Amino acid sequence: MVESWSFLDTAESNFRPLVVIELAKGTKEETIEWFTKRIVDKKANGGAQLLMKPLVTENGVENIYLVGASHLRLLLGAEAVGLVKECSDNSMRTFTYSSRKTFKHYADDNHDFLTMAECQYIIKHELENLRAKDEKMIPGYPQAKLYPGKSIVRRLLTSGILVQIFPLHDREELKKLSHSWYGRVKIGYQPLDDIRCYFGETIALYFGFLEYFTFALIPMAVIGIPYYMFAWEDYDKYVMFATFNLLWSTVILEVWKRMCAILTYRWGTLLMKRQFEEPRPGFHGVLGINPVTGREEPMYSSIKRQLRIYLVSLPFVCLCLYFSLYVMMIYFDLEQWALDYHKENESNFSSLMLYVPSIIYAVVIEIMNLIYRYAAEFLTSWENHRLESSYQNHLILKVLVFNFLNCFASLFYIAFVMFDMKLLRQSLATLLITSQILNQFAESFLPYWLQKRYNRRMRKRMCSTKTDMDLSLAEQVNMEKEMGTYLGTFDDYLELFLQFGYVSLFSCVYPLAAVFAVLNNITEIYSDALKMCRVYKRPFAEPTANIGVWQLAFETMSVISVVTNCILIGMSPEVDALFPDSKMDLVLTVALVEHLLLAIKFIMAFVIPDKPRDIQMKLAKLEFESLEALKKQVRAFQTQLQFLLIHH
């Protein structure tokens, strides 16, 4: 970086609040002064060199502070975090302040060159990288220990001094986005670029995947409707549907990789270098020296962590899986009771009673999933993983294993132990529809109703009939700080993962599964958009190049679907009639076909490139230019060294 941080002025006449910091009530004055000084102090002195002002209300100064930054500071911060922007020649390059004039739409007076989400991400990065120098504790709180290199913000959070940090909504931009996104019912694509500019790449990529998956379900739904209407009881016909299912589940995931690469290249995150991960806030241990960074930080034995995983977490997960199977057997007892009741009475009421066990079981499954989720989070936190990525991977693995068994074990049992296709169809339909209704209610409608009720009370308290656009800054901050916190895309991807399982594993038995999935996802797009814009605080943008471990989860589900569909095909009377003498030949044939289909699946995954050809060429060109620039620097250094040696 040619320009030094020292020339940057920390005062700016047009202060634009971007991030809100809420401290605990009664926070000591010396703590506030010290924390404020560290935020506004120059980089050379270990500060963040940001702008910070207290929020002034009618009651005076509260424990809430607004953080912003000068335009110049944000540009230098964009270089520090490695943001990738579009150049004037339409190529994507890592932004540097020295070459700022080569980037498209850049001008010294254009303060919209960086999106608001990018500005807030830069401020979050700078706040999280505020580190203790020679302080041994947080001033005013001797129990809140510090050591050189420790993140100050994380220590304040874990000590309860810092309540929350969140980015402010831009009411005008939010209104425009809401109108184009969910304000009117329309058939068309979502404004993904606008979503990305406002909420960041992680949120935009989830909505992109939700939209893509919904469109990908349409062929299955279109084929499923006539199949349901004309061949409902003719189970021989599901051979063709199962075969199509196998190809469909493979192709859509491979095509998504290409779509994802196109989106993330356009947004610049495909080129962003992975930053060195800091220890997660909940990580604890004995102070030691990190051999990689040389910093003093908590150290924890990996052997202790492995013992916790294999001696406590693994047995607990197995116990939960056993309990899930036990509940499943109770469900089958209820099914048998309902069937016997229907045989004795044969009335309209008894016909309805046939669906009651499945509905009860679907509700119980959702409750068990929720309880297990909390237990899994506690266990994974107790395992004391150093990195956030490691924590997330272990949590996702625990949750996926339990949810898969809890949601699909009964269907596998009905299909491959009881061989009851009629009950399989009924159970699949009831589980799918009930879970969708419960998820829509719990994730969107209930939080929206509660938030709307709270907003109404807040407006009455402020004796105000103002709209959101007319609220003062203080009123806006006070309303937003009480809104719920969006906990990330984990639950949203999990819902899609389970839906993909219902459609790909057994939909040949219940062809309308894809139809209900499409209808659910259309409402999901609108309800999730409403949730993001109206229910939750604005989340910080998080750059990402793909959907992460969820891609592997979906691919694993598609492999399992090949196995289940092959067995379903082998169980059909049509195929069974081809092997009247030897069932062993049937088993061997099904196994052979299954292996061939898996081979075709992996060949297709290999043949279909993850990135389109033009993006591959652009990435190769950038890599070549980077190597050439490095060689040029090395040659210049060698020339300078030779010159010094000659004239010595």
Image (cartoon, grey):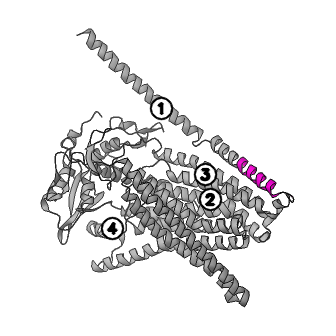
Q: What residue type is labelled 3?
A: Leu
Which residue is label 2 attached to? 215
Q: In this view, does 437 lie to the left or right of 485?
A: right
Quadrant of the rendering where the C terminus is positioned: top left
**Counting residues from the N terminus, which is met first, the one under dot 3 or under dot 1?**
3
Q: Is residue 290 left or right of residue 226?
A: left
Q: Is residue 90 left or right of residue 35?
A: right
Instruction: Specify few, some or many for label 3: CA neighbours under 10 Å numbering under 14, 14-19, or 20 or more.
Output: some
**Counting residues from the N terminus, which is met first, the one under dot 1 or under dot 4?**
4
Looking at the rendering, the stretch of residues picked out in magenta corresponds to: 581-596
Q: Toward which corner of the image does residue 15 lie, by quadrant?
A: bottom left
- Looking at the image, can residue 182 be seen? no
Instruction: Specify the label residue 623 is tagged with.
Output: 1
SS for callout 1? helix
For the residue pair 297 and 526, the one nearer the viewer reads as 297
Q: Toward which corner of the image does residue 77 lie, by quadrant?
A: top left
Instruction: Specify the label residue 253 is tagged with.
Output: 3
Which residue is label 4 attached to? 480
**CA gap, disc 4 to disc 2?**
34 Å
